[in-house]
Amino acid sequence: MTTVKRIINFYTEGFRSMTVGKKLWLIIFIKLFIMFAILKLFFFPNFLQTNFSTDQERSDYVIEQLINKK
Amino acid sequence: MEHFDMALVDWSRAQFALTAMYHWIFVPLTLGLSFIVAIMMTIYVRTGNELWKKITKFWMTLFGVNFAIGVATGIILEFEFGTNWSNYSWFVGDIFGAPLAIEGIMAFFLESTFIAILFFGWGRVSKKFHLISAWLVAIGSNLSALWILVANAWMQNPVGMRFNPDTARNEMVNFWEVLFSPTAINKFLHTISSGYVLSAIFVVGVSAWFLLKHRNVDFAKKSMIVAAVFGLLSSFYLVLTGDESARDIYHTQPMKFAAFEGLDDGNVSAPLVVIGFLKEVPDPRQPDVDRFAFKIEIPNLLSYMVALNSNVFVPGINDLINGNEKHGIMSYYEKIDKGKLAIKALGDYKDALERKDQVAAAENLKVFEANYAYFGYGYYDDPNDLVPSVPMAFYSFHIMVILGVHFMILFIVLLVLLYKKKIEEIRWVLYIALWTIPLAYIASQAGWVLAEMGRQPWVVQDLMPTLSAVSNIDKSSVVVTFWIFAVTFTVLLIAEIKIMVSQIVSGSKNEGGH
């Protein structure tokens, strides 16, 4: 328990004493929000996962694409 | 080729190039600065000199800014794989899965754990443990780069796999062959050493600015010594690994090799073009066409470099297209025929399976496997479509090499001036050091332009061209996300530069706070 408390203290004190780091964390959170909550959700669906339900269907589709794209 | 939506292919390529190039702005500085910081911290721990503590904290803060802004920008590339490049992702999935999973684990456990200790550990953990953390952050960030570079190397030289025609996936049959292929080893070593050189240039450039401003003189000189020594040693290594990479490309991607040398017709005792300017030529495939407006070349050197023998034949673009029986080079015409056979056999194999005709399936599978090595060629009718942009390959290669030589000379000059204690007097050298920072980024980007544009039209060498790798999606969505990325990454880059500059201006005055 003491070790866990020490680790938690290590991180909380570290975050508290940051100067430029706070601005950087804000940038990181905004960036991750844009990436995962906007881009991934609305603009980047996984094409094969979304359009097909089994691996067999995905394989068949890709083979069809490979054969006919000529 | 008329069946392809080339606008979709081009926008998808442009988007991937944009995100990869922005991602690569942040990565090389992380790779090299992490080691420079670890070296500086080692000196501090060994000497106990408080100035070295201040130096370490200052550069560590800049490392932290770059790391924070750049972290996760590579994830966008994985989004694009799944959405824009689904055929490719499926085709390579089993090869990429293992290296990328290992990368994720490495990056998470090594970098994420020890980077917190590195930044929060001053006075809270022992000096020894703090120092070990610094080295583990450096090793961890470089190891996590290993896996994505192994995956990229596999695309340049696909080995250690077998294509499964039932699943349409390449399956790994020999992990060690994938990991230790000469292409993978050279790519990893050359790429990380280029990151070291870029980081060293960054440190000497910023230190030169301090010296020009007569600020933190001792601090700047000490930083410059560490960076210049690290940069010079890395530059020697960069040359060695670059030389090995070129030899590997000569064997595995001869068209890329011919393109970056602007070599249309092959030659025994081929010369190396040191500097050259290309001119517009209506048809470079015609005999005796010279595409150079000007060039300086060293006789025999290209042949010597590829085989340590100046009598070796180096094939040109025309030899690869038309074949060269004397030198055992199969023509692209023949490869196209074999590729078409492979594609047809794959279709016939699937049809035979549906009809439950096992004999026909086995026959077609045999034809497919015999010609699979040329599968991608089957998408083309004209071999000229298999030639990359020669000016793009030529200039990116030569810019990279010329700048690499400039960096090496700069490190030597700086070290000599530091040794003779004249570094503050020769101000024009300091200005050159400062303005070399953007040149290091240009050289680094040029290296990737060469690697990726020079191998066109392939996304997986000889097996999958870029045009067959794209998803069948609406072009407009790719265009929209291209501009979203362009804006987002530009904002991030501006944020990085602003924070970096403010830290450089103010950070050295205090403890280099983070």
Image (cartoon, rainbow, N blue to C red):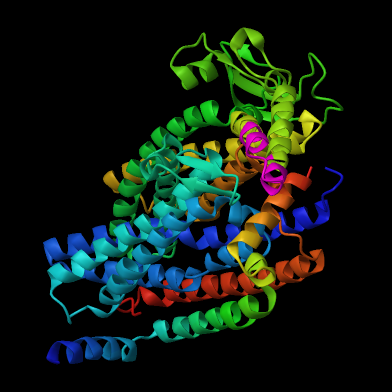
Name the residue rendered at 68%, 50% in the picture: A63
Name the residue rendered at 59%, 72% in the picture: B494
Taking B334 as reference, is A56 above or below it? below
Residue B71 locus on image (x, y percent): 47, 70
Magenta residues, start to end: B349-364
In the rendered view, does B247 fall on the left or right side of A67? Answer: left
- Can residue B387 be seen here? no
User: What secondary structure characterizes most of the magenta part?
Assistant: helix
Which quadrant would the C terminus of chain B be assigned to in this image?
Answer: bottom left
For residue B28, which quarter of the picture? bottom left
Is B500 included in the stretch rendered in magenta?
Answer: no
Residue B153 locus on image (x, y percent): 49, 43
Taking B510 as reference, is B407 above or below it? above
- Can residue B107 be seen here? yes
Which quadrant would the N terminus of chain B be assigned to in this image?
Answer: top right
Residue B367 locus on image (x, y percent): 64, 30
For residue B16, which quarter of the picture? bottom right
